Image (cartoon, rainbow, N blue to C red):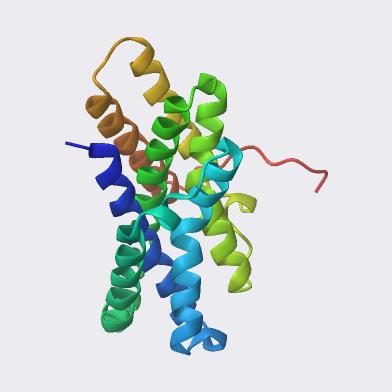
Amino acid sequence: MQLPYYIDLLGTLVFAVSGALAASDKNMYRDIFGVAFTGFVTAVGGGTLRDMILGVRPVWVADGNYLIVVTLGVLLALFFKYYFLKFRRTFFLFDTMGIALYTIVGVQKSLAFGVSPLAAIILGMFSAVMGGVIRDTLINEIPLIFRKEIYATACLSGAALFVLLKSLGVDDNVNAFSGVILIFMIRILSVKYKWTLPKVGYR
């Protein structure tokens, strides 16, 4: 079973939903093209950046399943938009699930291309957060990684756990599950208990 492949598709789906929901919640992106485009770049933006750094062709260019999944995610967001937006936590959960899945896929793929463990951790984080950065920029919001919320740090923690467990010889499926759960829990708990990183500045 190609678990990383299916995790990547699942991450693509939830990020497409996340991006389309964010766009549909803005008056300036009420038209279907704006919603679909935002969902698309949210879903593939981080992975595309990662693949460019690794020097390989982005997966969605070669594999049509990714475009099918993105389309499905956009359609889900459009048809169930009012239900999703009525329960604001749904958007948060989709985004959190997306960054958790994308982080682990990014680490796994980076290690498979022979990069150093530290670089793989960073690329895993890039895979997860850059789609959201593009999404927030398009809808004129401050990207989450520039806010006080713990976001990228959660991704780095999950990626580091994956690399650590792999170095100890633990099965990759266990590593992936553990990394996803750690990212998910850090993100959930940090929002619930308002955990933040130390501020930098003079104010």
Quadrant in which the N terminus appears:
top left
Q: Residue at x 56, y 33 (%)?
A: 122
Q: In the image as oriented, which residue stretches furthest toward the front?
A: 62
Q: Residue at x 51, y 20 (%)?
A: 117
Residue 65 shows in the view: yes
Q: Residue furthest left?
A: 1
Task: Locate residue 171 relative to residue 13 in the image: left or right.
Answer: left
Q: Judge from the rendering whether residue 145 lies leftward or rightward of residue 188; answer left or right.
A: right
The answer to whether 203 is drawn above or below residue 24 in the figure is: above
> Residue drawn at (37%, 25%), measured in percent from left and top?
162
Where is residue 173 drawn, in percent x and y?
23, 29
Q: Position of residue 81 (x, y in %)?
A: 32, 80
At a point 54% along the width and 36% down the height, the residue shown is 123
Q: Nearer the viewer, residue 183 or 203?
A: 183
The image quarter in which residue 4 lies: top left
Seen from this angle, which residue lies furthest right?
202
Front residue of 186 and 163 = 163
Residue 141 visible in rendering: no
